[in-house]
Amino acid sequence: MVDRVYKTSIPAQRKALERLKAEFSGLNWKTDWTKLRIEPLLQHAKQLEQLLRPQGSTRLTKGVGMFHSDLVYLRDNIRGLEQILRSERESLRRRVKAQGRESSGAMRPGRERFGPVQGRVP
């Protein structure tokens, strides 16, 4: 019988992918990560879940090692996608913060943005 860990972990990974799909859809990306990585991984997780249903589990007792590698593959990809999401959110925050400073006139009064260079000129 296929280990219970796979029967609980693969659906959990599928739910994490669905959550990431929703989070990625809310951001404006140059790269469409949903179509590029999330949807294929989601389809793969769904296929694995179908194989783990009771009628298939008796046939797959010798393939447990392959389920383990699939689970590791899903986990690694989810971690990578979460890092991309964090990085993009931080970048977006920095851009918004910088735009806010420029529009609020955060420069010292009386100074031009790109004024003449102070000091000796040869």
Image: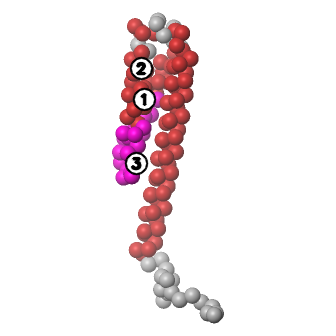
Question: Is residue 64 shown left or right of residue 45?
Answer: right
Say which residue label 1 marks.
14
State the predominant SS element of the stretch in magenta: helix
Above-or-below relation of 23 to 77: below
**Secondary structure beneath label 1:** helix
Residue 99, how many percent across, how many down?
Answer: 43, 68
* Magenta residue span: 13-37
Three-letter residue code for mark 1? Arg
Say which residue label 3 marks.
31
Residue 104, how many percent across, how many down?
Answer: 42, 75
Q: Are marks 1 and 2 in contact (CB under 8 Å)?
A: yes
Q: Are marks 3 and 1 in contact (CB under 8 Å)?
A: no
Name the image quarter holding the C terminus.
bottom right
Above-or-below relation of 43 to 59: below
3D distance between C-alphas at marks 3 and 1 = 22 Å
Name which of mark 1 and mark 2 comes first in the sequence: 1
Name which of mark 3 and mark 1 comes first in the sequence: 1
**Secondary structure beneath label 2:** helix
Say which residue label 2 marks.
49
**Secondary structure beneath label 3:** loop
Residue displayed at 42% across by 34% down: 17
Residue displayed at 41% across by 36% down: 38
Above-or-below relation of 11 to 37: above
Question: Is residue 34 shown left or right of residue 111?
Answer: left
3D distance between C-alphas at marks 2 and 3 = 28 Å
Look at the image and tell me whether residue 5 can be seen: no
Look at the image and tell me whether residue 42 can be seen: yes
Residue displayed at 43% across by 69% down: 100
